[in-house]
Amino acid sequence: MKYLIVGATSGLGRELAYTFAEKKNNLVLAARDDRDLQAIKSDLSLKFRVEIKTISIDFSDIEEINNKILYDKEVHKNLNGVLFPIGFMVDKDNLLLDLKTIQNIIFANYASTNYLISKFFELFKNQEFTIVGFGSVSGLLGRNVNINYAAAKRALESFFESLAFQNKKKNFLIQFYTLGYLDTNLSFGKKLNLPKGNVKKISEIVYKNRNRKFLKRFYPFYWRIVSLLIKVIPFNLILSIKNLISKN
Amino acid sequence: MNINGLEKTKTFSFDRSHSAKVLFKRPDKFREIEDLSKHNRTLINTGSNLSYSPLGFYKDSISVKLKKFNRIIDFNLKKKEITVESGITLSQLLNFTLLYDLWIPQLPGYPFITIGGAIASDAHGKSCALHGTIKNSIKEMTIFHIKNGWLSLSEKENKEIYNLTIGGIGLTGTIVNVTLKLEEFKNKNFITYKTKVNSVNECISEITKKSKEKDSFVYSWNMAENLKSLGKGFVFQNKINDDNVENFKFIPEEKKNKFLPFLPIWNKLTLKTANWIFYYLNNSSNHFQEDDFTSVIFPFYGKEAYFKFFGKKGFYESQLLISENTIEDFFDEFKFIYKKFNPTISLFSVKNMRGTQEFLRFEGNKICVTFDFINNKKNILFMSELDKICVKLKIIPSIIKDSRLSKKIVEQCYPEYSRFRDLINNYDKKRIYKSEISQRLEI
Ligand SMILES: Cc1cc2nc3c(=O)[nH]c(=O)nc-3n(C[C@H](O)[C@H](O)[C@H](O)COP(=O)(O)OP(=O)(O)OC[C@H]3O[C@@H](n4cnc5c(N)ncnc54)[C@H](O)[C@@H]3O)c2cc1C
């Protein structure tokens, strides 16, 4: 089997690469910095004797996505699925952001995934093909920081739900995980109220579920309860509580 | 506390004599290593922070932890060479190379030590009489220095910095990857022979004799609870067991006894009891036994309780390189101050060492003597007297192991101290890389 992992050099992407390689899957790893890619490639191929292809790519650049992923037949050959553990954040992602940066955030976190999947829907329509997306609990509710990132992640979730509707008669295997903080570099040093999720564990879960027709899950699981609460409590009430807390 | 991916944690030296609230950075991408300059602070590298001395942290520096840089970059079976990232631990390295019957023989005694940490401390293993220090296994390295950028180091390229980096206690920049020369190592099981000795002199002559034998690792365990039994103990000799061709068991990559609390159990009485039990058990058992790889090469693995039993105050270790000509004088003087201070020594061990001393490296064709002490006033006074003996007899005390050593003592014992300091200052003019020890030693 062969999988494409987009955003494969750090955090969850890196762990997924190790989990899938350990189970003897060949991989296409896409990320920005070729040095990081080469280091993972050599490590995985030496330890697990699997074939690794790397693509150094800027995921906010449509030309690169076309040329390096869509038009490269080597990437698609025998491909069985694609995973998008990709997250692009910038400092000061607030209301005052310029349009170009907003576009970059939306493109990297939402539109590029959407675009690639729609093309893969065409390319792999005659075979079973796994598509795994990753949202973020930051998309559960509006917020003060990373606001465009959160909006893009919420859009992505909606997109994956639509994908499930479209997939009724097709062979795609679609899974979507909404992730809370994981014990990756992104949360390193952050003191959080809730415990961090284990990145190794979620990778194993993703691997185990890769053949499920449709799956939508929270990880760590307690975010499901938080999400339910957010859905049932009227937004006005949430807003009042939030204002009260910040006043104190 | 989070400041741009930094974590503030209270950190201790392995002997627990020093602690500080330290900011850690744990890069997992090359770009993050290069971006360290953004923080505008001094830095120091840290591996697994298993050094007895506070070498990998300083209250005002960011400790750069390369835990995520632990990958195998290249492996050439024919040439017997491997390139690894410096955050790889000894167990992770060996679990790969031993599958191909290859290893590096200079392995310090704990599996979670990183290659970066071992190189920066020029570590040695049990076989140091045969194989010297890890310096002998290094072919080339790549380091990153905030001001000097990426540098390739080897005997042929940037030789001076290469030499400063090995045993350079992390002051020349971050070792990112290293190419190691591997040696063949077919059979991974050992037979351990033991010989009873009744005095320090007998122990040293036995060790000197046995260390000359091929492919054997020789060291001793001696008692030091009082002057009468000083040196009484056993000389152990690990030899490769050619009759046992069983595959090696993977070396643990996770700590055992992780949650064992610090209990102040060691004192004169408990140590005396434990030592005599150990002595009698060894005395009454066979003079040889079969041992596996982990228990021979990483003797402290699974025995972490020994360190925890010093309690939260911890302990001190003194490791000394003494020339054959002065060893008798050393023990004469040692006995003299022993009489005066009656120290509580929990470990006394001897082995032979091979190499050439340079800079601050703990190396030389000498006898390596180790003592562990409970951390108390009397013992600290005793160790100060030991320092004086070191200066007098030109003995080299280990900076890596003895966290107490002052600049004055190091300057007098290490003939190349000033040369090392001046070269480091010339190379890193702004002195960006600083640890608790480099500050104390005024490097
Ligand atoms: C139980 C035990 C047994 C031991 N046995 C032995 C032994 O038999 N022989 C022996 O010689 N030593 C021995 N040691 C000591 C040990 O080998 C050294 O202290 C070693 O440096 C610890 O490695 P570390 O990965 O924990 O590094 P740290 O303690 O974190 O760092 C040690 C030094 O290395 C530097 N450093 C770490 N990583 C890098 C890097 N990537 N780039 C540049 N500099 C770096 C740090 O700045 C610091 O100066 C033992 C230690 C323990 C705890």
Image (cartoon, coloured by chain):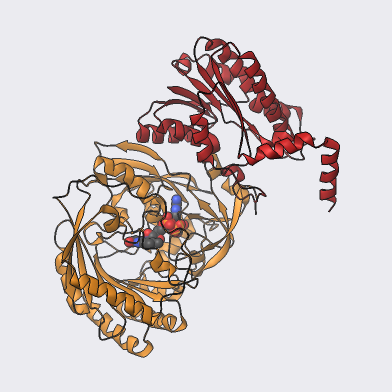
Chain colours: A red, B orange
A37 shown above or below B388: above
A79 shown above or below B5: above
Which residue occupies the foreground of this view, B182 or B374?
B374
**Left or right position of A131 against A140:** left
The x and y percentages for residue B5 are 61, 47
Which residue occupies the foreground of this view, A95 or A205?
A205
Which residue occupies the foreground of this view, A184 or A214?
A214
User: Residue B213 is drawn in which quadrant?
Assistant: bottom left
The x and y percentages for residue B209 are 14, 68
The x and y percentages for residue B341 are 38, 87
B436 shown above or below B88: below
Q: Residue at x 70, y 29 (%)?
A: A154
Which residue occupies the foreground of this view, B123 or B2?
B2
The x and y percentages for residue B313 are 49, 73
User: How many marks are shown on the rendered structure?
Assistant: 0
Q: Residue at x 41, y 70 (%)?
A: B402
Residue that sits furthest to the bottom in the current view: B340
**Left or right position of B259 against A51:** right
Q: Pick the quarter of the image with the N terminus of chain B.
A: bottom right
Quarter of image, ligand 1: bottom left
**Left or right position of B78 against B344:** left
B4 shown above or below A163: below
